[in-house]
Amino acid sequence: MEILNHYSEGGFNQTKEKIRLPRGQKDIKLPKEIADKLNPVAMRIGEQFDLYGFRAKINFRCLLKCLAHRNGRKEVAEDDFQEFLELADFMNFKYNTI
């Protein structure tokens, strides 16, 4: 309710943040062992929509690769997966407390 009320009182204030986007495509490798660890999280998210979680897994694979790239790696590492798990706590529609 606090978030909804905030948007009633003025809403989103856009700031001029500068971000650096990579030029061209980047090939970030995702080891199968780490990709397989996404299954329980993807299934949990999918259950919220009475689905299987395929789309969630595809999106999570991309997020893992983005985290690896941001962390200066060309291959997803366990540290990237652990960071993903921290973020996954906030990927919900059952209203987990932020």
Image (cartoon, grey):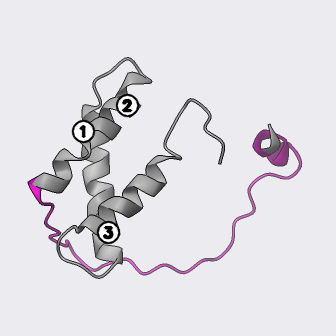
Name above or below for residue 47 compared with residue 95. Answer: above
67 w.r.t. 36: above or below: below
Q: Which residues are magenta?
A: 3-32
**Could you say whether the residue bearing mark 1 is in a helix, strand or loop?**
helix
Q: Is residue 97 left or right of residue 13?
A: left
Kindly indicate whether the residue at mark 2 contacts the one at mark 1 (C-beta within 8 angstroms).
Answer: no
Which residue is the site of mark 3? 79
In this view, which residue lies farthest toward the right?
9
- Residue 18 falls in image quadrant: bottom right
Which amino acid, mark 3?
Answer: Asp
Q: Residue at x 18, y 76 (%)?
A: 74
* Residue at the (34%, 39%) spot, across then down: 41
Along the line of sight, the residue nearer the viewer: 75 or 33: 33
Choose the circle earlier in sequence order: 2 or 3: 2
How crowded pointer 2 is (Cα within 10 Å; few <14, some 14-19, many 20+) is rated as some
Residue occupied by mark 1: 39
Residue 48 visible from this viewpoint = yes
Res 44 label: 2
Binning the other alpha carbons within 10 Å of mark 1 as few (below 14), some (14 to 19) or many (20 upward) gives some
